Image (spheres, helix red, strand yellow):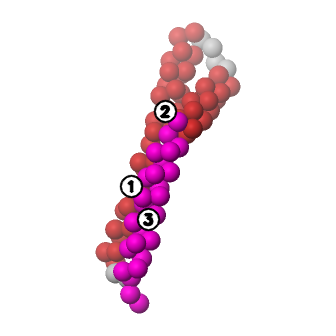
Amino acid sequence: MTTEFVLYWGQQTVKTAIVVTAPILISGMVVGLIVGIFQSVTSIQEMTLTFIPKMAVVILVILFLMPWMIEILTDFMRNMFSQMSLISN
């Protein structure tokens, strides 16, 4: 196993993690921003008001994008396992 091989798979792992989690994090951030603007405009400072909408949107995004996420992760694992056969001690 060479250093380049390990670095390549480390980079691929980070890239895959970012690609899979980005829609979830971005949707939560957008909802938080919208609720924050709403709270500023209406002067409502309730902490639970931000938590419930973010949680609901994150759950919906996960449920909606689950097939795509599974496809990305299985492709990654399939590529990783096929490359493992090339490793020689």
Along the line of sight, the residue nearer the viewer: 24 or 50: 24
Residue at the spot of label 2: 27
Task: Identify the residue at the far bottom of this view.
Answer: 89
Q: Please report the residue visible at 39 percent of the width from the left and 55 percent of the height from the top.
A: 15
Q: Please report the residue visible at 47 percent of the width from the left and 28 percent of the height from the top.
A: 30
Percent of width and height locating residue 36: 54, 21
Real-space Cα separation, disc 1 to disc 2, in angstroms: 19 Å
- Which label belongs to residue 15? 1
Horizontal side of 40 relative to 44 (left or right) equals left
Q: Please report the residue visible at 37 percent of the width from the left and 62 percent of the height from the top.
A: 11
Give the amino acid type for the residue marked by disc 2 in the picture.
Answer: Ser
Main SS of the magenta part reads: helix
Q: Which residues are magenta?
A: 64-89
Residue at the spot of label 3: 78
Along the line of sight, the residue nearer the viewer: 45 or 67: 67
Percent of width and height locating residue 76: 42, 60
Percent of width and height locating residue 5: 34, 74
Percent of width and height locating residue 85: 40, 79
* Contact between labelled residues 3 and 2, with CB atoms less than 8 Å apart: no
Q: Secondary structure at mark 3?
A: helix
Decide which of tag 1 and tag 2 comes sooner along the chain.
1
Magenta stretch holds residue 49: no
Quadrant location, the C terminus: bottom left
Q: Is residue 37 visible?
A: yes
